[in-house]
Image (tube, helix red, strand yellow):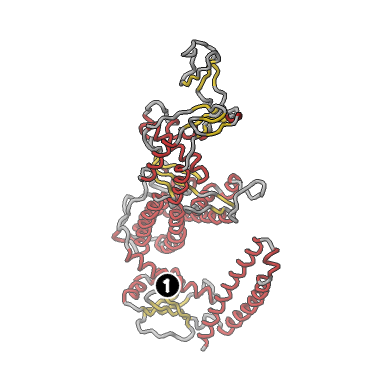
Amino acid sequence: MARIEPHRHSVGHCYRCKTVVEPNLSRQWFVKTKPLAEKAIAAVETGKTRIIPESWTKTYYEWMYNIRDWCISRQIWWGHQIPAWTCQACRRMVVALDTPDVCPDCGSTDLVQETDVLDTWFSSALWPFSTMGWPDQTPLLKTYYPTSVLVTGFDILFFWVARMMMMGIHFMGEIPFKDVYVHALVRDEEGKKMSKSKGNVIDPLNVIDQYGTDAFRFTLAAFAAQGRDVKMSEKRVEGYRHFINKLWNAARFALMHLDKGYDAIDTANISLQDRWIISRLNRVARQTAEALDAYKFNEAAGMVYQFVWHELCDWYLEAIKPVLYDENASQAKTATLSVLWHVFREALVLLHPFTPFVTEEIWHSLPGTEGSIMKACWPEILAPGEDPAVEAQMQTVMDAITGIRNVRGEMNIAPSTALTVVVQPDAPLVGETIEKNSLLITNLARLTEIRIAMDAQRPKAAATVLIEGATLFVMLEGIIDFAQEQARLQKEIVKLTKELSGMNKKLGNEDFLKKAPPEVVAGVREKHAAMLEKQHALEATLARIQAMME
């Protein structure tokens, strides 16, 4: 094992460090680091310690391969004082754990302790084991050393991480941690480093007061991609506050119907939407666990966000409302309630690492739960497990509903107006799926009727919706005034074209692009892109209207 050898320089040429020492540096203490660095390098090269993302290993190696002796002394008032005493009689230096009473050479009691203090990074380098009772072999140290993971910023990779590696291996004979996760830096919304002088600092306490702790935490997790900094803006936090509100409202809805916990799911009586949400939960739980194990926090947050908002709240809760509001205590209703309880419970567990406060609050209101959600196990596979066939069938149903809703929106048809739809499937299986779930499609798409016709021809005055495996014809005769709708669209397109023309002139003006603030130019470009997209959508709708008038 390499020996740590702190020493004081003599003025002039130091024979140990091979450096020229100026008088004002003659009091510094150094550690020979090359033998320590070699073992710390080997630990990363052999994979005993991983640096994540792996790209940061290059920075680690560059520092360690070119390391110099480490100055561990600082001439400041505070810090851990160096345990060295100088005899004023014979100038003997004594290094000891306990304060010596006499000089071991001459017996003098006139001993003066070194006034320098240890470098902050030297003290910090001992942190993985000194905080757990070292040098004593405490039960805490035996249990938790080496630690699992160190989370840190790239800017102290060599200041702190490398030094902890050297000290841990030297004193403990083992690496201090198995993984080093280098997190992103939080910058302002333009990607600039936050600075009080620039006035672009976002005070987290103010953000928390305004939007809530959970929304702030989720924002940081959602944008914490490996190797990329987080561009923070209050607008993004506000967006995730809407997500927290969505979860809260979903919980209120679910708790209106759940009056107990369920030991198991009644798989014999569950519907397509029940089987689908179970399959999706199982898949998301597995993928989220894999992402967290790989320190891909943004991917984990994104998957849970998609599942909770768009699949659980937007689709599943809407799909089961007719069943839940059925006054008859049927087997189907009981089965759906068992699915709702299990899925909502597991969704809270998935969300808890990102939004601990709101999930804890809801957890205690959910029937059938005990203790804190922090003690809950990670979701296990619910029967009937992941089912790609069920997910494909439900996707067909959702595509049909979405397509019909898009027609309603494009044609400016009121939600209260019921529609008739004819489906021409390309394959019998798609037709069977739509037919079996026609009640679900009718409820969510607000239809009076949906018919399956293998040889259907496009009816007059019908909007066409293409989904995978089928063509849907949405009957519009008697629903809208085609001439009036054509005139409205043409008028809106003309107005939009004039506005786009003005923007094109502005964006083509070199003086504007050079003199206007970057954020103003970016705002104009963003607005231009949005208006152009709207124009294309209006033109496409107009073309459909004109085709139906022929």
Q: Nearer the viewer, residue 518 or 430?
A: 518
Instruction: Name the kind of residue labelled 1 in the image.
Output: Ala
x, y percentage for residue 320?
41, 62
Q: Residue furthest bottom?
A: 550
**Residue 370 seen in render:** no
Residue drawn 32% across and 50% down?
263
Residue that label 1 marks: 400
x, y percentage for residue 520?
66, 62
In the picture, measured across the screen, residue 537 lies left or right of residue 38, that is right
x, y percentage for residue 524?
64, 66
Q: Residue furthest left?
A: 268
In the picture, measured across the screen, residue 18 lies left or right of residue 398, that is right
Give the vertical position of 253 relative to 116 (above or below): below
Secondary structure found at label 1: helix
Instruction: Report how many numbered discs are placed on residues in the image.
Output: 1
Residue count near mark 1 (Cα–Cα under 10 Å), binned few <14, some 14–19, many ≥20: many
x, y percentage for residue 237?
56, 53
Residue 452 picture quarter: bottom left
Residue drawn 45% across and 68% down?
444
Residue drawn 38% across and 27% down?
138
**Residue 221 seen in render:** yes
Residue 436 picture quarter: bottom left
Split into 4 quadrants, where in the image is the N terminus? top left
Residue drawn 71% across and 68% down?
511
In the picture, measured across the screen, residue 167 lies left or right of residue 72, that is left
Give the vertical position of 12 relative to 253 (above or below): above
